[in-house]
Image (spheres, rainbow, N blue to C red):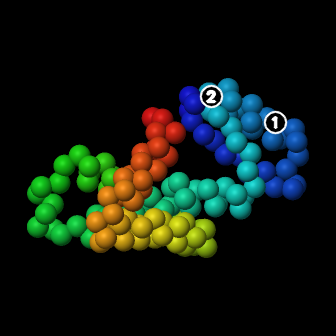
Amino acid sequence: FDHRAVVITPSRSTCDSDYRTIEAFWKSLGALVYRKTPAAHDRAVAAISHLPHVVASALAAGTPAADLPLVAGGWLDTTRIAAANVELWRQILVDNRDHVLKSLGKFEKVLTSFRQALEKGDEECILRLLKEGKDQRESVGD
């Protein structure tokens, strides 16, 4: 857990000493501990975990079977998480449906921007969108 994020979601009934004990445990393992409300946690994981799973699954499902012998690193890296347990992911997506839908809406807007830029041949917009994605990805490191 060295330098890995761990989110603790105390409720109103969580006593401070219990929170501090749990926080100390995770920090002792090297984790970066974040305190969030359950709703803030669900909103965040919809964007950083659940949406990527939906996108990976959609990409994998939408790839023509005839093209699969040609796949290489990019497709394999991008779709790796689509190979996870589907029943578990069905439950996760249904349980966090509202936040996942909001994240999907934001993603669809960016995807539409890419589509429109490609349709118009707007290379500046394509470059800007690619740079925004690159900068966002690089901001979190490995």
Q: Earlier in the sequence, mark 2 or mark 1?
A: 1
Residue at 79% from the left image edge and 35% from the top image edge: 21
Pointer 2 residue: 29
Residue 42: name its quadrant.
Answer: bottom right
Number of disc labels: 2
Decide if residue 77 is on the left or right side of residue 44: left
Above or below: residue 79 compared with residue 29:
below
In the rendered image, the vertical position of residue 7 relative to residue 3, given as above or below: below
User: Which quadrant would the N terminus be assigned to in this image?
Assistant: top right
Point out residue 19 in the picture as x, y percentages from the top left corner.
Answer: 81, 41
Residue at coordinates 67% horizontally, 46% vertically from top-left?
7
Q: Amino acid at mark 1?
A: Arg
Q: Residue at x 43, y 60 (%)?
A: 53
Crowd around label 2: few <14 · some 14–19 · many ≥20 (10 Å): few
Residue shown at the point (41%, 71%) measured from the top left: 112
Q: Nearer the viewer, residue 29 or 106?
A: 106
Element carrying mark 2: loop
Visible in this render: residue 100? no
Tag 1 secondary structure: helix
Q: Which numbered tag is attached to residue 20?
A: 1
The image shows residue 133, relative to residue 110, as above or below, that is: above
Spot occupied by residue 134 in the image (x, y as percentages of width and height) = 42, 45
Q: Is residue 128 left or right of residue 83?
A: right
- Compared across the picture, whether 8 is left or right of 84 comes to right
Q: Position of residue 87 (x, y in %)?
A: 44, 67
Please tell me whether residue 39 is drawn above or below residue 3 in the rendered image. Answer: below
Question: In which image quadrant can residue 30 be found?
Answer: top right
Residue 140 spot, x, y in % from top left:
52, 39
CA gap between label 2 and label 1 equals: 14 Å
Labels 2 and 1 touching (C-beta < 8 A): no
Callout 2, which amino acid? Answer: Leu
Considering depth in this image, is 4 or 47 the residue closer to the camera? Answer: 47
